[in-house]
């Protein structure tokens, strides 16, 4: 059983690590790892190193002499050398261990992926490679020798020397073990060069398997853009002679920022128009940038302990979001980010897994690589920036890099640079880091016609979350603008700073009663309750100058309709009317139009109903959403067809913002029209599709219409050898199937020989694809929960991290009716009862059931 770790228990390590030397001889079944740590004692106590069960320890020496057995204790997860066996001052500890990469299906530490040796050490994987102070505040330069007959041998830092069967690497920048990496394999590089602003020449390589070279170019281009952007936007230059990226097929997460040697899930590197969609391209560009940006926010300045994870992740997500806004449309990016935040983080915050961006306890840190740490962590920085202004933000960041370069830091250090750079007191602001839960912001309006004064009265409440019953008020930046009833903006955006539980703000000198455009740009991660008429919303849909608020008005109009329809009401004609207005607008950015045409997903509707105190019925929600799409398609078929024709992109394909925006508008129109034409148009799009974006857009509709057999057969035949495309094949079928078809479809796919659960992408593709079918996952008979539980039980002994992450499919069970809840509880209890269940999954299931 894993024990709970507490933030309050932090103690510095009582030794100084001066240098780490590794000499690693790679072999699939028995890799030999020799380590030499140059150490110096800085406090009393024994030397305790972290290690995992898989280490076969061959020798432990101090200054060349074997540590006497009575001074040495090797327990399950610790190697301890008694106080008295340790010399005063400096000494060298050398260990030799043997490990088995081939047996490593957990993909943590050193493992094999398709014949390539690679590593994943964050958060605590290095302890599966050798005994080590595996904590982020112990940093050292590394010198690494790799021995293998593989043609390409890579590690962190700069190459020093190599010969047949060996290579030596030196990383001069002190780093914690979680940033260590090695790769050995038969790989090909797609290469480029980059000259930094101060003239350092950097060799860039994207390493892929032979045959994949023609799909690596976009990743390389994205890297160059990211490197340039970080120089311009943050004044951050790269600091080594080489930057290597390696794509591997088996990877638990998206990618990893190991110093100078980023390792990526191949789905975030490889792309061609035939195999990747526009959103794949956008994601690749963003993640390549994200991992590159970690070089400063994460590597040069790292975290003191894992409770501070959002220090590097929140900031790096914030930076990658800024980057994408600059590369593409800022308005569209903001809306996409809010959609994701609500779908994933608000959902987490509203359920049993709620935790603050900086948690103060955990059992398994890998369970805290969450939407809250990442995406909410980024939102919190966005608020900070809004509160101190662009200049203040820039000064604070300069100070952060200046003051903390080379250090392992805390959220306190981070807030202190903002306080010192701007003079602002951030005591109350800090609650955003320490308190869980999404505040609910309620707004009422008082209009005084005689005085020309509008008073906005706000209240904030945050529901209790696990372990945090009381929620003191937070500082909330509320961006507001005012529109006149004819749609002109009478008061441009103003940021109101709410600090109390209840607070009012007045606007004077108004000629007539305005319509309030609230929470512009989504200025704070809160939910909003306001009394607003449909006509006011419609006015905002038509005229708001803030693109987010405009989209939000349309989205909430649709949400209100869907919630009412799911509860048995008819649809609201105001919605279709407002859509008509949007569709009639010729000058709209197509990507923005696509977002305006999007209806809230079924899971979002269920979440909203729960927020309003209702018990969501998944079948009714599904029917309501289908009915509304059918109605919108029927009402606007002619103009939707026009959009499809106008947005038909010219060749050649480019994954840029303009083309992908047009394709997304076209496919959004297709999704609506497919509700009324039996899949006729989708078939036509499929037949003429020139790229994977159109194919997937069409295929989704063909599956929904029950006429996808030919398309699926073609896909399978054409792409049998392409794992990434076949992942789409596994995802889209259960996801787009009618709710009562999804389970048989998923079962049939799970029975295929190419459903290899040792490949995380494939597992996520199928089980996640099924889980994305809301009404199927939450089937009244519990069959969806059972299917998921069965597979979590199967994957847990193979890959506990993946099992634990996928548990979040079941996190929303408390929302639903008694019958569904009982089924969900039984499924979760079945997992909990599994003999030998991993600590990762045990923690998740316990929290979800609590
Ligand atoms: N630091 C990586 C990233 O940016 C995530 C790696 C997490 N890996 C893990 N096993 N928890 O985004
Ligand atoms: Zn990251």
Image (cartoon, grey):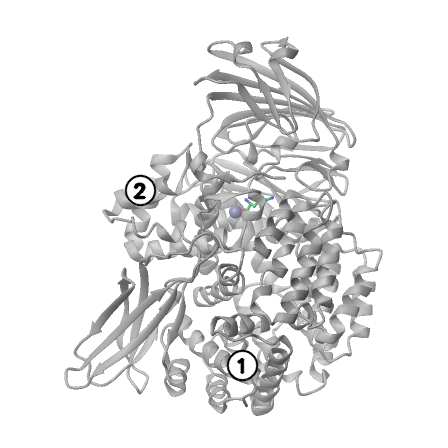
Depth check, front residue: 844 or 714: 844
Please rate how many residues cluster around mark 2, counting C-alpha atoms within 10 Å: few if below 14, some from 14 to 19, many from 20: many
Q: Residue 450: x, y in percent?
A: 15, 86
Depth check, front residue: 402 or 216: 402
Q: Which corner quadrant holds the C terminus?
A: bottom right
Q: Is residue 847 left or right of residue 297?
A: right
Residue 416: which disc? 2
Depth check, front residue: 343 or 2: 2
Residue at x 49% of width, y 28% of height? 138
Task: Say whether disc 1 or disc 2 marks the residue closer to the N-terminus.
Answer: 2
Q: Residue 394: x, y in percent?
A: 32, 48
> Cα distance, mark 1 to mark 2?
45 Å
Q: Is residue 131 left or right of residue 519?
A: right
Q: Which residue is mark 1?
A: 562
Q: Is residue 231 above or below residue 164?
A: below
Q: Is mark 1 within 8 Å of ligand 1?
A: no
């Amino acid at each position: 059983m894993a024990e709970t770790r507490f933030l309050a228990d932090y103690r510095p390590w009582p030794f100084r690590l001066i240098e780490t030397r590794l000499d690693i001889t790679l072999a699939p079944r028995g890799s030999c790892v020799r380590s030499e740590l140059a150490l110096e004692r800085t406090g009393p106590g024994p030397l305790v190193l972290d290690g995992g069960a898989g280490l076969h320890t061959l020798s432990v020496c101090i200054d060349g002499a074997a540590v006497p057995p009575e001074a040495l204790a090797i327990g399950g997860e610790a190697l301890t050398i008694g106080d008295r066996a340790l010399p005063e001052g400096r000494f060298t500890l050398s260990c030799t261990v043997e490990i088995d990469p081939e047996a490593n299906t957990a993909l943590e530490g050193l493992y094999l992926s398709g014949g390539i040796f690679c590593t994943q050490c964050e958060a605590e994987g290095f302890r599966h490679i050798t005994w080590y102070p595996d904590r982020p505040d112990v940093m050292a330069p590394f010198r690494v020798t790799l021995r293998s007959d593989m043609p390409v041998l890579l590690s962190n830092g700069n190459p020093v020397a190599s010969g047949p069967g060996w290579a030596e690497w030196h990383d001069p920048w002190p780093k914690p073990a979680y940033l260590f990496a090695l790769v050995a394999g038969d790989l090909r590089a797609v290469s480029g060069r980059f000259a930094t602003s101060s003239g350092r020449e950097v060799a860039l390589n994207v390493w892929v398997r032979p045959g994949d070279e023609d799909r690596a170019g976009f990743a390389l281009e994205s890297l160059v853009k990211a490197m340039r952007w970080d120089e311009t936007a943050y004044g951050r230059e790269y600091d080594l002679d080489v930057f290597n990226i390696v794509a591997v097929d088996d990877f638990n997460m998206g990618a990893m920022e190991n110093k100078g040697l980023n390792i990526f899930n191949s789905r975030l590197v490889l792309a061609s128009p035939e195999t990747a969609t526009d959103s794949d391209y956008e994601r690749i560009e963003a993640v390549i940038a994200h991992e590159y940006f970690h070089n400063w926010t994460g590597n040069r300045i790292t975290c003191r302990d894992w409770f501070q994870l959002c220090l590097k992740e929140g900031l790096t997500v914030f930076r990658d979001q800024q980057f994408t806004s600059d590369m593409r449309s800022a308005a569209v990016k903001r809306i996409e980010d809010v959609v994701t935040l609500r779908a994933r983080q608000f959902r987490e915050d509203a359920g049993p897994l709620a935790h603050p961006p900086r948690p103060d306890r955990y059992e398994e840190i890998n369970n805290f690589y969450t939407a809250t740490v990442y995406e909410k962590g980024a939102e919190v920085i966005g608020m900070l920036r809004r509160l101190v202004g662009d200049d203040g933000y820039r000064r604070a960041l300069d100070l952060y890099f200046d003051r903390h370069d080379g250090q392992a830091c805390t959220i306190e250090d981070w807030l202190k640079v903002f306080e010192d750079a701007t003079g602002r007191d951030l005591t109350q602001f800090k609650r955003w880091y320490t308190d869980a839960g999404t505040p609910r912001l309620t707004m009422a309006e008082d209009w005084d016609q005689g005085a020309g004064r509008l008073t906005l009265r706000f209240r904030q409440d945050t529901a209790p979350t696990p372990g945090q019953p009381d929620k003191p008020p937070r500082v909330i930046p509320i961006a507001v603008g005012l529109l006149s009833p004819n749609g002109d903006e009478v008061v441009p955006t103003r940021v109101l700073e709410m600090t109390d539980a209840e607070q009012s703000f007045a606007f004077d000198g108004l000629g007539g009663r305005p319509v309030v455009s609230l929470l512009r740009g989504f200025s704070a991660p809160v939910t909003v309750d306001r009394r607003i008429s449909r006509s006011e919303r419609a006015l905002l849909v038509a005229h708001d100058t803030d693109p987010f608020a405009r989209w939000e008005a349309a989205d909430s109009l649709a949400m209100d309709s869907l919630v009412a329809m799911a509860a048995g009401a008819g649809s609201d004609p105001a919605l279709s009317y407002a859509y008509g207005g949007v569709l009639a607008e010729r000058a709209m950015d197509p990507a923005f139009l696509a977002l305006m045409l999007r209806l809230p997903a079924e899971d979002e509707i269920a979440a909203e109903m729960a927020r309003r105190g209702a018990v969501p019925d998944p079948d009714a929600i599904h029917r309501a959403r289908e009915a509304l799409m059918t109605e919108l398609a029927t009402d606007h078929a002619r103009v939707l067809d026009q959009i499809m024709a106008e947005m038909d992109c010219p060749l050649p394909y480019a994954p840029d913002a303009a083309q992908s925006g047009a394709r997304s508008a076209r496919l959004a129109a297709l999704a609506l029209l497919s509700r009324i034409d039996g899949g006729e148009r989708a078939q036509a799009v499929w037949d003429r599709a020139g790229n994977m974006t159109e194919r997937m857009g069409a295929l989704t509709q063909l599956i929904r219409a029950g006429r996808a057999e030919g398309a699926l057969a073609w896909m399978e035949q054409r792409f049998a050898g392409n794992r990434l495309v076949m992942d789409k094949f596994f995802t889209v079928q259960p996801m787009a199937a009618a709710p009562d078809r999804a389970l048989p479809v998923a079962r049939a796919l799970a029975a295929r020989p190419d459903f290899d659960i040792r490949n995380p992408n494939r597992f996520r593709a199928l089980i996640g694809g099924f889980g994305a079918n809301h009404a199927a996952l939450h089937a009244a008979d519990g069959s969806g929960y059972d299917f998921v539980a069965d597979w979590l039980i199967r994957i847990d002994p193979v890959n506990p991290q993946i099992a634990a992450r996928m548990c979040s499919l079941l996190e929303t069970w408390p929302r639903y009716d008694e019958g569904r809840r009982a089924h969900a509880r039984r499924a979760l209890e079945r997992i909990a009862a599994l003999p030998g269940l991993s600590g990762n999954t045990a923690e998740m299931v316990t929290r979800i059931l609590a």
